[in-house]
Structure formats: C-alpha cells, structure tokens
Amino acid sequence: MNSNLSFPIPNSELPDGWRWVKLGEVAKEFVNGGTPSTNIPEYWDGNIPWITGADVTDFWVSGGRKFITEDGLKNSVTHLVPRNTVLVVTRTGVGKVGIAANDLCFSQDITGVICSEEIYPEYLAWYIFSERNNLTNIQRGATIKGLTRNDIESLQIPLPPLEEQKSISLKIQELMQEVERARTACEKQLEAAKALPSAHLREVFKSEEAKKWERKRLGEVLEEPLKNGLNYRKEDFGAGVKFVNVSDVFCSARINNKKLDRINVSIEDVKKYQLQTGDILIVRSSLKREGIAYPALFIEDEEPVVFCGFLIRIRPDKGKVAPFYLLNYLRSSIAREKLIGDSDTVTITNVDQGTLLSLDIPIPSLDEQQRITFELKEKMVQVENLQSAIQNQHSALSVLPQSILRKAFGGKL
C-alpha cells in the first residue's frame, strides 16, 4: 500500500488493545463481480439487484438501476452476496465504499468483502472510506485504472476489539449525520444570502416611491449609441490589449480588470472598441437563456481595454443617469425579466439593440440616484461579507469528516 498515508501507518503507536492487521487476515471471503450477457434478454429484468460502481452512492446500498434473473445469476461469474457485505469500488470511482443492505450481486468494478467475526462491517467500510485518496493513488492500469485483489487484501487496518469497533462506528455515524445537518443548513443559508441582492433591488424599483419617478427609454439616456464588441479568433489570444469576455461579465457586477485575457487587435480597433469608466457591458448572446442581458460595470484601467462581440456596450449620459444606478436597474428582476422575455432563441439566445433601446427605465433626480446607489452599495457589501462568512463555514464543514475519521482510527474519538 502507498506509504504516504494521511492516517497512522503500521508500526505507529495505537491505543492499548489495538493492532495492525491486513484486510486479508480478517476477511472471511473476497467476492469478485461479473456481468450477465447483455445479448440475452432472459438474463435481465428479474428481481435480483445487480449494481455497478455508479450505484454506490450511499453508505447502505440496497440496489441500483438494474435487476437480473436467476438464469442471469447462474450463467455469469457474478455472485449473490449477503447483507453486510462491504462493497469496494475497485475501478471507475476507486475507493467508493458501501455496505449491502440486502442480498445483491454486482459488476466487475466492485469487490465484495465478507467480514469474519473479528471485524465489524461498518467499521471496515468507514476505514476504507477514510483511505479513498490513498487507494486512488495506488491504482494502476494501461486503459482502465483500478485496484488489484492484492491491493485490497494488503490494506493495513488499525483493529481495536470488536465491541470498540461497534462503538466507534456508531460514533462516526452520529458525527457524520451532525456534519451533514450542519452542511445542509449552511447551504440553505447560502442560497438565502444569494437571493438578498435581488430582494434589495426589488425593494427599490418596486417601491411606491419608484412609481412616481419619471420614466424614459434607455435610448433616451445614452451619451453614445449602443455598440456591439469585436469578433476574434482563438489564435488572437495570449498577448496585446486587455479584453473583456462574456465570462468576465458573469463573474461580478464590476469588471475585474486584473483578471482579463489579452488579445491582438489593430490600433483602429482599439480606438473603436476601447472602454471608458462608467460603460456598462451587457451579454448579447448566451447558450443559456438566463445568461442573456446580464450586465457589469467597467471602471477605468491604466491601459486600453476592449470587449468581445457577444457583449453590447452601453455608454450612459452621466448628466441624465448615474452608471451605478443604471447598472442596478439592469440587474433587477424587473429589467431582466423584460429583456429575457423579449429575446430571441434559435440555437443560442440573443437580445438585440432595439430591445435594449426600448427598455423602460425609472429615472429619479440625480441626487436621488446617488442616494439609492450609496445605500445599495452598502447593502451589497454586507451581502458579500455574509456570503463570504457562510462560504468559509461551508469549507470548514467540508474538511470536518476527514478530521473525524483521523481521530476515530487513531483511537482519539
């Protein structure tokens, strides 16, 4: 086995009464899988569960997507194994592990381990789960990588007395359930936090106050006409001028100039497509309908920046509308639902300049726009901080299972 283990290695100190053993020493039987012929219909659609590695998704495995008949079982090398057989995926998903919840059989990418009275199946399954990374590292094969029978039999296991194995297994299960509950709650909090920006925008643009504001078409508040970006080839990338692509617009409400790719373009094109502070770029074409008309704001860079043909540049007249205010309106559900609803879809979804120009926009006074912008900025910063805190909590929960397992199999749980 790989000697670069993340858990105690053989000959390392174990609690009193524990010892290192090879799996082959405490397994009653190793069972190989097999597949009945797919060309014989009589072997399939029976009532015997037959699983593959892809079906090992839960700790307890009761069945998969397919069932075979008695004839299918008799006329293939697959074997029926009893409940509590530990199922180890040895090819395509190496290291995945589960326990048979009932009698079943399986394909060649699984090895079944029937435990002797010395080792508790759940304890063994949790230990193999803890060693998945190491098992993945030692897999080999020219076309299909996997583990050999010897790899499984040689797996070194820290073995406490049987009753302690049961106690450890129960404790691991309880702690893993607590972690999963915490992770689920964390993910719900994150989803709620992601919905806050839209809620803040709706609060502004669907307010009673907003109903009193003057309304204008987007085309009436532009300094310059809308402009589609430049087309490019893959070989143009790598050097030259900074270049805003569709993915850069999706990343944030404000273009991150430090992460832009570069593209070789002519001086004439730089002059024609160069961005200015306060320009808004909006997605013109998207494979996903919900990606259409997504906007982001550009802030001046120390060098020229151009943009791609899948984007439309909006250059607002700052004497009529503040760029941040307009950006927030374009990001609101009111504007997005209108633009998405009026877009055309063939193979990809497109929004044209005419649809944008006719977009109806509430326009309060510039002072009111600045006030709204300031308040929204403060709220968005709070949302970002909240999302960051929840993400950090989620990351901490993601590594907690391995910490639990390290302690469990070091006798420190």
Image: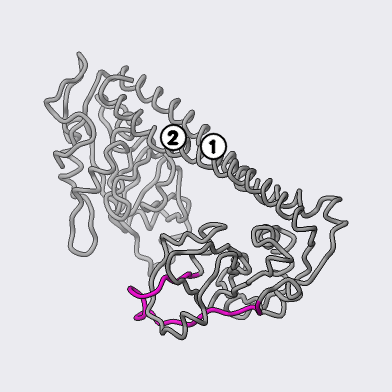
390 is higher (above) or lower (below) than 309: above
Residue 143, picture quadrant: bottom left
Residue contact at pointers 2 and 1, CB within 8 angstroms: yes
Q: Secondary structure at mark 1?
A: helix
x and y percentages locating residue 325 in the rendered image: 69, 58
Q: Amino acid at mark 1?
A: Cys
Q: Is residue 187 left or right of residue 56?
A: right
Label whose residue precedes the other's in the sequence (2 or 1):
1
Residue 161 belongs to the span the image colors magenta:
no
Residue 173, picture quadrant: top left
The residue tagged 2 is 397
Q: How many badges with numbers are in the image?
A: 2
Residue 244 belongs to the span the image colors magenta:
yes
Report the front residue among 366 and 134.
Answer: 366
For this orientation, the residue located farthest to the top is: 16
Report the front residue among 60 and 305.
Answer: 305
407 is higher (above) or lower (below) than 371: above
Q: Which residues are magenta?
A: 224-245
Residue at 50% across / 41% down in the picture? Answer: 388
The residue tagged 1 is 186
x and y percentages locating residue 270 in the rendered image: 46, 80
Crowding around mark 2 (Cα neighbors within 10 Å: few <14, some 14 to 19, many 20+) is: some
